[in-house]
Image (tube, rainbow, N blue to C red):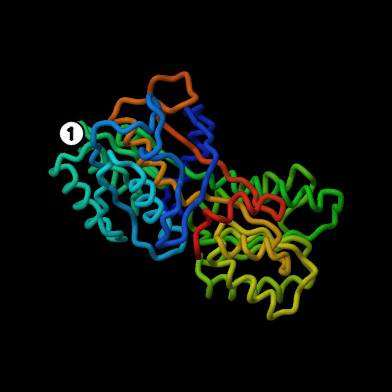
Amino acid sequence: MSLSRTTTKIAAGLAAGTTVLALAACTSNDSGDDEDLGGGTSEAEQGSNDEEGDTVVIGFSAPAADHGWMGSITESTRNVADQYGDVDLRVAEGTNDVNLQISQVETFINEGVDAIVLLPFDGAAMTPVALRAMEAGIPVVNVDREFDDPNAARVTVLGDNYGMGVSAGTYICEQLGDDPDAVVAEIAGIDSLPLTQDRSQGFEDSLSECGLKVSNRVAADFTVEGGEEAAANLLQAAPRIDALWNHDDDQGVGVLAAIENAGRDELFMVGGAGSANAMRAIQDGDSVLQATVIYPSTQGADGVKLARLLVQQKALGDLVEVEVPRTIQLYAPVVTSENVDQFIDTAFES
């Protein structure tokens, strides 16, 4: 997930009328499998975008896989590249060292790759080298964490942190909207990050539509241990909770453990990001976890597909436009027991 301060520009971009295309999100990706993420050249129809064309060399760089969601970013990117006989994907080792990531992009530039797909550790810090790539005629696809100059990327692929909060709040409103005294709690991620602030703002705005508000709120740190500690504190402070939104399914493992340890079952919980273990719990129906909101981990895979289209001078299918859009924002659907079968096979392991 995005940890960059620049992610906050998602909402700003929307407000400014940036061209945004909502794509149905498929999430990947159990590390190590070869799931079909859709498309590929092996069975492409003649004349379709997937029909094999000239080979496209794509450089890919992302942060270290120190989180389930981040691990699936690179894995799904590799998987989708493998489906295209005309894609030569060069994957740099994941790193949280900005200077190393800059050198990786410089290497791609020197090698003369056809396109670069980049999920920056720090969007602002990676902007100058991305600009150099663009000036060298190499299109850059910026994934998840935005650069601070729109000229540094030909295409930007984004999740929707504010939309996650809206989706979670809307679902809770649907369950509790007729109870003005309902107690709603929230366990956020790292509070200093704009992505967390965006999620919380969307949640607050959505709850206000049905007259509800967040009564109890704590922040964790996207880890299992942090989630368990934050949840234990929350449960101790709130003797009754009707609904709880936890921002992240990785930390949700700890949140669920704390709820179980406290023997609390009067509430229902909504998760965030869309991990496979969260979806299995929803599918089983024997825990308080009733739903989760997806933050797609296939953004790098989408970036590869878009880079291929750019270099081969193709457009997105089903659009009238003859060029690939400048910004693509992915949807944040709610996964429940009613639709979990649609998502679980491509969910990531946390």
The image position of residue 265, as x and y in percent, is 77, 71
Compared with 210, 248 (above or below) is below
Compared with 334, 246 (above or below) is below
| Residue at 42% in and 62% down | 31
Question: Left or right of 153: which side holds 213?
Answer: right
The image position of residue 203, as x and y in percent, is 65, 49
The image position of residue 130, as x and y in percent, is 26, 41
Residue 152 seen in the figure: yes
Which of 155 and 128 lies nearest the eye of the viewer? Answer: 155
Crowd tier of the residue under label 1, counting other residues whose Cα lies within 10 Å: few below 14, some 14–19, many 20 or above: few
Question: Left or right of 132: which side holds 68?
Answer: right
Task: Give the tally of numbered discs.
Answer: 1
The image position of residue 127, as x and y in percent, is 29, 43
* Three-letter code, disc 1: Ala
| Residue at 86% in and 53% down | 179
Which of 269 and 112 lies nearest the eye of the viewer? Answer: 112
Residue 88, picture quadrant:
top left
Badge 1 is on which residue? 136
Helix, strand or loop under label 1: loop
| Residue at 54% in and 47% down | 161
